[in-house]
Amino acid sequence: MLTALVSCGDDDGGGVREVRLDTSFGSGGVVFTPMGEDRSGGLPLPGGSAVAIQPDGRIVVAGEGAPFGVQSITVVRYQPGGALDLEFGQAGVATAEIGGRSDAKAMILQEDGSIVVAGSANPRPSTYRVLAVARFDPAGVLDATFASGGIATTDLDDIYAEANALELERDGSLLVAGHNVGHPVVLRYQPNGTLDPSFADGGVFRLPAPRLGERGLFAAITTDVRERLLVAGSFATSDDRYDLGVVALDASGTLDSKFGPGGIAVSPIGLRSESRAAVADFDGGIVVAGNTQPPLVDGRRYDIGDVVLAGYDHRGVLDTNFGNRGVATIGGEGLQEANAMAIQSDGRLVVVGGSEAPFRLRILVARFLPNGQLDRTFAGGVLHLDLGIDAELNAVAFQSDGKIVVAGGAIDAQYHRWFVVARFVVE
């Protein structure tokens, strides 16, 4: 049984609006797609990591799964009503198997209907991982004209690399952000899947160490109204502290000295903080969403537990008109995580993730006003939904009719896991 738990708050004058599951989608507004077993543990839950809506209303979700027995980059396409699109891939599911394990963390749709995903892969049995980018044609078949058989893998001469974010440029080039053994990196691929030698150093930007210590990662990438690349991440600012921040690059992959101190803006929030998502706002700034660990309570250290948003202006300075001196949070008892964010046409920000309940992990959907205040007209500001098993959201997108589509992962006590897709109506 699905149970909606809505946080209550003061009405801002517009009236509190009901946020409910769209019963015309799937079963009561939710679709579960089986993805095999997973015993790796950790958060965010494995499953759907990215979601996009095609012009015809079909919904595409990418992530990691083992629908055919091998842990693979997995893309699933659904009809507008939530049924699997049997014309796509193999009965609605397409995979790219790269070695013993591969995954997709980000996805974009191209104008011709092609689907590009980015993540990582183990090309041989070990902990060694490489960056992976794959392109599928509109029918869910790997595109043989892209890289090698539809897949580009990039070994950065080290033992562990992952891609977390993907951005499509106007000329069809692809920007991929992630890390290489804890060092933040951005790569640019040409439309054919080869590295662009004109970008940074042979197609790869590495954050100069020790600008922010020796460790960190990029989690999100976007382009602002000035055509700058804004890359959000988490950076080691001391031996035991990480802080969220943003790096600005020009089109050539060079740090933009007009943003923050030398192209980098980092904000100490709580005891530590991390970035999971970012969007460029309509005023030339950027909003970063992630998680923060509140100050110590009675001398005890807790896991990161609060959702946090940080708003920066075009100079890389915290915007004092956003939230509380540039920072907005969702606190409360237990763990609450933000994993993804999207901006509506009116500038409101929808954040999704997960929150702890006494018996299981619930999905979380929240909406903020453009000024960083919780949107109290949106079901009071924050909605927690119990799906009956541990579940968490990792992606959000908007339909043309204003409905909110979210995707993530779910897992039960026997380690069976699913892609989870849900659709909400705001009334």
Image: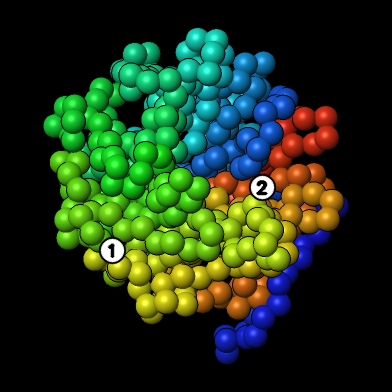
Instruction: Looking at the picture, tell me which residue is in the foreground, 252 or 104.
Output: 252
State the residue at coordinates (27%, 36%). 206
Residue 124 lies, with reference to residue 160, above or below; the image says: above
Residue 23 lies, with reference to residue 45, above or below; the image says: below
Question: Which is more N-terminal, label 1 or label 2?
Answer: 1
Is label 2 in a helix, a strand or a loop? strand
Residue 342 lies, with reference to residue 63, above or below; the image says: below
Left or right placement of residue 277 versus residue 422 in this view: left
Q: Position of residue 188 (x, y in %)?
A: 26, 33
The quadrant in which residue 217 appears is top left
Q: Which residue is mark 2?
A: 392
State the residue at coordinates (67%, 55%). 302
Instruction: Looking at the picture, tell me which residue is in the foreground, 114 or 35.
Output: 35
In front: mark 2 or mark 1? Answer: 1
Q: Which class describes the residues within 10 Å of circle 2: few (<14), some (14-19), or many (20+)?
A: many
Q: Which residue is mark 1?
A: 316
Q: Position of residue 395 (x, y in %)?
A: 54, 48
State the residue at coordinates (43%, 61%). 268
Q: Amino acid at mark 2?
A: Glu
Q: Amino acid at mark 1?
A: Gly
Left or right placement of residue 61 versus residue 189 in this view: right
Left or right placement of residue 198 versus residue 82 in this view: left
Left or right placement of residue 385 versus residue 244 in this view: right
Q: Position of residue 262 (x, y in %)?
A: 20, 55
* Residue 2 visible: yes
Q: Which class describes the residues within 10 Å of circle 1: few (<14), some (14-19), or many (20+)?
A: many
Is label 1 in a helix, a strand or a loop? loop
The quadrant in which residue 6 appears is bottom right
State the residue at coordinates (44%, 24%). 160
Q: Position of residue 78 (x, y in %)?
A: 59, 38
